[in-house]
Amino acid sequence: MAQPGDSASSERGSPTRRRRQSAPSATSGDVPLLPALGEPGTTSAQGWGERPFLDVAGAPPLTRGDGWFWLFFGLLGFLAGEIVGFVFAAIAADLAGEGNQLAAIAKLSAPPEWYVGASLVGLWVGFFAGPWLASRVRGTRQFVFDLGLRFRPIDAVGIVIGVGGQILVGLMYLPFRSHIHNFNGPTTKLTGAAHGGGFVVIAVLTVVGAPFFEELFFRGLVLKGLVRVLTPIGATPGRARTLGVAGAVVLDGLIFGLAHGELVQLAGLATFGAILAVISYRTGRLGMNMVAHASFNLVAVLSILSSRGGLIH
């Protein structure tokens, strides 16, 4: 029998021990972590990654301090992404023979595809690095588990949510469209002056790459950090917990909108970001978010393609 001073006893129940377990499992030693699928009292819909992440024992961030660290890593990741994006764009400009024109190109309403692609990929380096650091330093070191990077067949519902999101945003702006100059400017700038094969590459980055990395960052990292910071530890369903989660959802949507740097589009992006935050919290996963986000972006890309009359012009 272990004595009170034994290391095994002193570490039992320690947040550090739970946080740095080698792999998430139904149990680890004497500390219950996650309900096993099919375990008495649970169903497959109640298991790991199938319910609000706040309800899953052992799911990081474990403490309010960990939550603040996750948000800090989010800030570092965003800043790193901006820097790497600039570096990648500068390299691409040199390769294209436009090294001296980078500042002017960045201000174009329809920049060339090499600039758009390099900037996006560079930004995503930071969007991946932030969650990775959070998992390694203040998580279980099991990236997929910590960030909720899981998919289920039911995630196909995200297609309806994404298309519906575009309709909702369109209705929000309908009374103001005649007063907004160049309403589609942000989408036009994203697709740039690309056409033909270049447009296809940008479209794939927008519809596949952006949803993956942005959901990993904004809902996998930032939302979880916000929920843990704003929700009392061990809170049971009630007013305090509801207000904490609601505050996290609103803030996550607002941060998502602000990060895009488009003032006119802020309200629509923040609203859709909040919808994605609710989905992530309720499912405990990122799968449905990514499908919804991809569908939302696909509608925008198809709209631009339709207005151009095709890929070639």
Image (cartoon, rainbow, N blue to C red):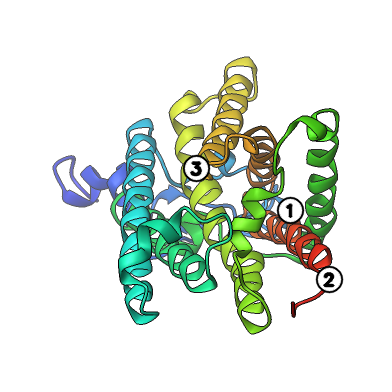
Q: Residue visible at 48% across and 34% down?
A: 226
Mark number, residue 259 = 3
Please rate how many residues cluster around mark 1, counting C-alpha atoms within 10 Å: few if below 14, some from 14 to 19, many from 20: few
Res 12 visible: no
What percent of the width, then of the height, locates residue 243?
60, 20
| Vertical arrangement, residue 281 with respect to residue 216, above or below | above
Drawn side of residue 4 relative to residue 48, left or right: left
| Vertical arrangement, residue 71 with respect to residue 81, above or below | above
Quarter of the image for residue 55 reads: top right
What percent of the width, then of the height, locates residue 270?
63, 36
Q: Depth check: give the residue in front, 293 or 154.
A: 293
Please rate how many residues cluster around mark 3, counting C-alpha atoms within 10 Å: few if below 14, some from 14 to 19, many from 20: some
| Vertical arrangement, residue 138 with respect to residue 104, above or below | above
Residue extending furthest toward the left? 5
Residue extending furthest toward the top? 239
Mark whose residue sits in front, 3 or 2: 2
Mark 3 and mark 1: Cα distance apart in space:
33 Å
Residue at numbered disc 2: 309
Q: Residue visible at 59% across and 59% down?
A: 190
